[in-house]
Amino acid sequence: MKQALLVFLGGGAGSMLRYLVSRAFNTSSGIPYGTLLVNISGSLIIGFLIGLSLRSNLISNNLYLLLATGFCGGFTTFSAFASENEAFLRTGDFFHFALYGFGSLFLGVVAVFLGLYLSRIV
């Protein structure tokens, strides 16, 4: 039960922060920079947390559940990403669809690897 509560608390905090970032950076046209920012920074954070948990005892299982599963799970948003790409396709904006879709995927994977790397130098 304690572990479920940790995921719940982390997820709530992540979701609230995602809402605030998206509200501040998403515009009504073009690339949804708020969603891009949360997804890329969330990928960086989870890569860092994975790296720390693999190389040391700095992160307990409960802290990992709070931060990685809870916070990063609530902070990042695949459903918003998918919905925004559907809107690009629906309006025929193939340029932004390709730029945002493939750019998000590429940058997300790079951010995970960067997080893993950063965890090794701290």
Image (spheres, rainbow, N blue to C red):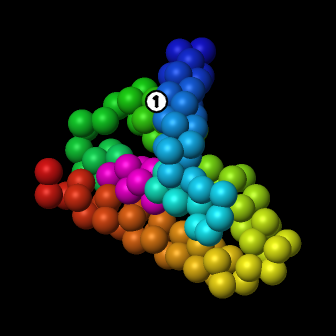
Which is nearer the eye, 65 or 89?
89
- Image height of 64 relative to 92, above or below: above
Q: Main secondary structure of the magenta part?
A: helix
Tell me, yes or no, if residue 102 can be seen here. Answer: no
Which is nearer the eye, 95 or 36?
95
Q: Relative to 20, is 113 on the left or the right? A: left
Q: Is residue 11 magenta?
A: no
Write the start and end of the magenta stretch as one range.
Answer: 40-48
Q: Relative to 93, is 69 on the left or the right? A: left
Circle 1 — which element? Answer: helix
Measuring from the top left, give residue 122's x and y in whole percent.
14, 51
Quadrant position of residue 51: bottom left
Picture residue at 39% right of the left edge, 64% below the top: 111
Q: Name the outermost residue toward the front.
A: 28
Measuring from the top left, give residue 26's x and y in whole percent.
57, 53
> 10 Å neighbourhood of mark 1: few (<14), some, or many (≥20)?
many
Quadrant position of residue 11: top right
Quadrant position of residue 84: bottom right
Q: Name the outermost residue toward the left.
A: 122
Tell me, yes or no, if residue 22 can be seen here. Answer: yes
Measuring from the top left, give residue 44's x and y in whole percent.
38, 56
Q: Name the outermost residue toward the right.
A: 90
Measuring from the top left, give residue 2's x and y in whole percent.
53, 15
Picture residue at 63% right of the left edge, 73% below the top: 101
- Image height of 53 relative to 35, above or below: above
Which residue is tagged 1? 66
- Please state which amino acid type lies under the numbered disc 1: Leu
Q: Name the outermost residue toward the top.
A: 1
Q: Where does the N terminus fall, quadrant-wise?
A: top right
Picture residue at 65% right of the left edge, 64% below the top: 29
Which is nearer the eye, 32 or 80?
32
- Image height of 62 relative to 44, above or below: above
